[in-house]
Image (cartoon, helix red, strand yellow):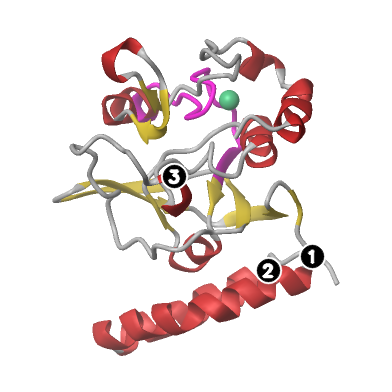
Amino acid sequence: METKDEQVRFDDMPERIRALPKDHRGYPVPYFVAWPNGKPDHRIMDRAKLWPAMEKKLCWICGQKLGAYLAFPVGPMCVLNRNISEPPSHLECARFAVKACPFLAIPAKARRDKNLPPDIEAPAGIGLKRNPGITAIWICKEYQSSLLPNGLLFQLGEPIGAEWYYEGRPASREEVETWIESGLPSLLAIAKTDGPVALLALRQMLHIARGLLPAK
Ligand SMILES: [Zn+2]
């Protein structure tokens, strides 16, 4: 994981990221990261920080106060179902996380599930377990949260805009469309089981998402 490429990407850290503690490799440790046995594990989200982040309106990545704009780094399917298991960040912090490491912003994703401590639970909601490849930064001014039996789930507010990345670099419209199309059958299957209202909602989400795609 410690490639030359990653070192280069860490060079242009925003001020707020620079203020974070560092791990033994010198990598910044985001606010959300858990410290089991006094050592940070970037793959694990510390659920105890969810409530303070929400209540005090803190950035999930740098832990500092949020402004009016809320940024959510999300996988392409979250753009359609609008559900995410983590609260928002500064746009600047989200951009850094997505560029520095697509998995920094979305812990415990498929690629690094190996060797996780056994007490790690799956995030709340229905996660479609596939390596995202494409990451979007959803930008909005508000969000909702709901308490599910296995944790908190957040719903993205009406979008002001979105930025799209493919493994850290800006994604093309074609790349995003391909990813959405490939994930659509599983979302359609879930919506069909849930009934016509869910299907209608999915169609509407799809329409909105298409309006947020990178320009042709
Ligand atoms: Zn921040």
Taking the image as four quarters, which one is ligand 1 found in? Answer: top right
Where residue 97 appears, x then y in whole percent? 62, 35
**In terms of depth relative to the viewer, which is nearer, 210 or 36?**
36
Mark 3 vs mark 2, foreground winner is: 3
Question: Which quadrant does the N terminus fall into?
Answer: top right
The x, y position of residue 151, in whole percent, is 22, 45
Task: Please give the label number shown on residue 112.
Answer: 3
Q: Secondary structure at mark 2?
A: helix
**Residue holding disc 2:** 176
Start-end of magenta stretch: 54-72
> Tag 1's secondary structure?
loop
Residue at image location 35% in from the left, 85% down from the top = 189
Principal SS element in the magenta part? loop
Quadrant showing the C terminus: bottom right
Residue drawn 24% across and 39% down?
Answer: 120
The three-letter amino acid code for the residue at tag 1 is Ser
| Relative to 119, 15 lies left or right | right
Q: Position of residue 190 (x, y in %)?
A: 32, 80
Residue at mark 1 to residue at mark 3: CA–CA distance? 26 Å
Q: Earlier in the sequence, mark 1 or mark 3?
A: 3
Amino acid found under the numbered disc labelled 2: Val
Lateral position of residue 161 relative to residue 174, left or right: left
Q: Which residue is mark 1?
A: 172
Q: Residue at x 18, y 37 (%)?
A: 119
Report if the CB atoms under discs 1 and 2 are less than 8 Å apart.
yes
Task: Indicate yes or no whether the magenta region holds residue 69.
Answer: yes
Amino acid type at mark 3: Arg
